[in-house]
């Protein structure tokens, strides 16, 4: 079964075709980073307009490789995300499904991220996933391809958001994650001990707003501080909390397989610390390939394939749900 995946929830326009949830035939991503860079963050209206103009090129290229008559199912992100951005993908998906008389399935963007790991590894269920991106930080118990339970999440900023905001405080590039990682390479992670919010709380929640503020105050009080040292110390504080709480959730739930997905899972220090922890405590740890950490449509096509296989479908009433959570499908 060939599934056409469409993803437009934020600032990446993406189209993919995946066969039987496994074989990637097409995987195209048009990033808008350069457009939003000058504003220091994603501007929603510009994102929607960019999707409208980019998607036609991606579809044309896709249909040159896989003609529309070979498609069996259309899978499209219906939330969470920016409403205007989501509506572009949904409208296009509906148009294709209607004209080709194809079934359509709405996919939760966060479930998509969880599926991104399977393109590089065969992970056995159940597993604990840390979904850590620009908009989300959640620890999830994954029972099978479509059954997931959120164990905890951030109570304020997402980890990626903290990277982006701290990068701004340190006058580094956008997006902040890769910029901080680069600056941190030259810095000392033990230069300053920033707080590890909720590290020892009994729940699986996170909080990064206070950490961001402490970097802000630190720079106000120490304007001559070495940016690389501050970046390295901040990065270590975030990674420490993410890794420790994720493995604690695995231990508490008797699960040996641990997965990291989402934009921040590209972070090198996160990967190294998670691998160390896994080796020490005998867990199996998995990450998507770097190019599948950030938004793409192959993960949406794969999730859509399994949703459809398990009997989930949508219809022409499908609409954007900007604040969709994983518990709600
Ligand atoms: O998954 P994603 O592309 O978009 C959302 O669904 O949010 O994640 C983007 C986020 C941004 O906040 C970016 O700064 C962060 O992922 N990110 C990183 C790295 N690469 C991207 N954070 C830390 N280290 C990285 N290497
Ligand atoms: Zn995402």
Image (cartoon, rainbow, N blue to C red):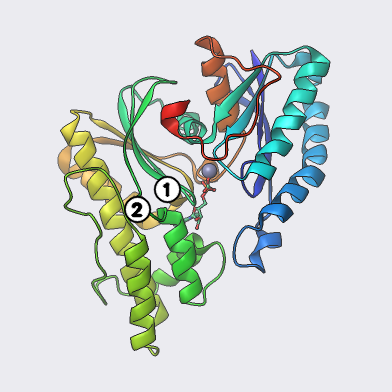
Mark 1 secondary-structure assignment = helix
272 relative position to 17: left or right: left
Q: Which residue is mark 2?
A: 270
244 relative position to 133: left or right: left
- Give how far across and how far down residue 319 sits, in percent: 65, 29
Q: Who's the residue at 34% across and 87% down the image?
A: 221
Mark 1–mark 2 distance (CA, rounded to whole Å): 7 Å
159 relative position to 278: left or right: right
- Give how far across and how far down residue 166 sits, in percent: 44, 69
Q: How many marks?
A: 2
Q: Who's the residue at 23% across and 49% down the image?
A: 244
**Circle 1 crowding by C-alpha within 10 Å: few under 14, some 14–19, many from 20:** many
* Residue toward you, 248 or 52: 52
Camera sees residue 66: no
* Residue toward you, 167 or 204: 204
Q: Who's the residue at 76% across and 50% down the image?
A: 50
64 relative position to 246: left or right: right
Q: Who's the residue at 74% across and 45% down the image?
A: 51
- Give how far across and how far down residue 90 sits, in percent: 70, 31
Tell me the quarter of the picture where residue 157 sits: bottom left
**Sequence-first tag of 1 and 2:** 1
Camera sees residue 321: yes
Mark 2 secondary-structure assignment = helix
Verify CB contact (< 8 Å) between mark 1 and mark 2: yes
Tell me if residue 314 comes above or below residue 48 in the rendering.
Answer: above
Q: Is mark 2 within 8 Å of ligand 1?
A: yes
- Give how far across and how far down residue 185 sits, in percent: 40, 69
* Mark number displayed over residue 265: 1
Tell me if residue 304 comes above or below residue 297 in the rendering.
Answer: above
């Amino acid at each position: 079964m060939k599934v056409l995946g469409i993803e437009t929830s934020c600032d990446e326009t993406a189209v993919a075709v995946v066969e039987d949830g496994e074989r990637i035939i097409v995987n195209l991503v048009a990033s808008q980073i350069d457009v939003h860079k000058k504003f220091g963050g994603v501007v929603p209206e510009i994102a929607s307009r960019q999707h409208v103009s980019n998607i036609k090129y991606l579809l044309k290229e896709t249909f040159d490789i896989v003609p529309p008559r070979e498609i069996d199912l259309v899978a499209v992100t219906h939330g969470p995300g920016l409403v205007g951005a989501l509506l572009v993908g949904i409208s296009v998906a509906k148009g294709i499904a209607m004209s080709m008389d194809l079934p359509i399935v709405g996919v939760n963007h966060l479930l998509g991220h969880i599926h991104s790991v399977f393109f590089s590894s065969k992970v056995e269920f159940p597993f604990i996933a840390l979904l850590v991106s620009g908009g989300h930080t959640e620890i999830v118990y994954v029972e099978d391809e479509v059954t997931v339970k959120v164990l905890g999440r951030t109570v304020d900023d997402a980890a990626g958001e903290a990277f982006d905001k701290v990068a701004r405080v340190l006058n580094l590039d956008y997006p902040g994650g890769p910029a901080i990682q680069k600056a941190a390479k030259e810095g000392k992670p033990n230069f300053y001990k920033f707080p590890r919010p909720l590290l020892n709380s009994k729940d699986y929640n996170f909080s990064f707003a206070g950490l961001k503020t402490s970097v802000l105050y630190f720079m106000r009080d120490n304007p001559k501080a070495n940016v690389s040292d501050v970046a390295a110390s901040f990065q270590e504080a975030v990674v420490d909390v993410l890794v420790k709480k994720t493995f604690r959730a695995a231990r508490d739930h008797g699960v040996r397989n641990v997965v990291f997905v989402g934009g921040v899972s590209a972070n090198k220090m996160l990967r190294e610390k998670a691998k160390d922890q896994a080796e020490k405590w005998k867990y199996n740890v998995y990450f998507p390939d770097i190019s599948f950490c950030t938004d793409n449509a192959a993960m949406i096509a794969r999730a859509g394939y399994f949703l459809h296989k398990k009997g989930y479908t949508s219809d022409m009433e499908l609409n954007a749900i900007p604040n969709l959570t994983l518990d709600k499908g």
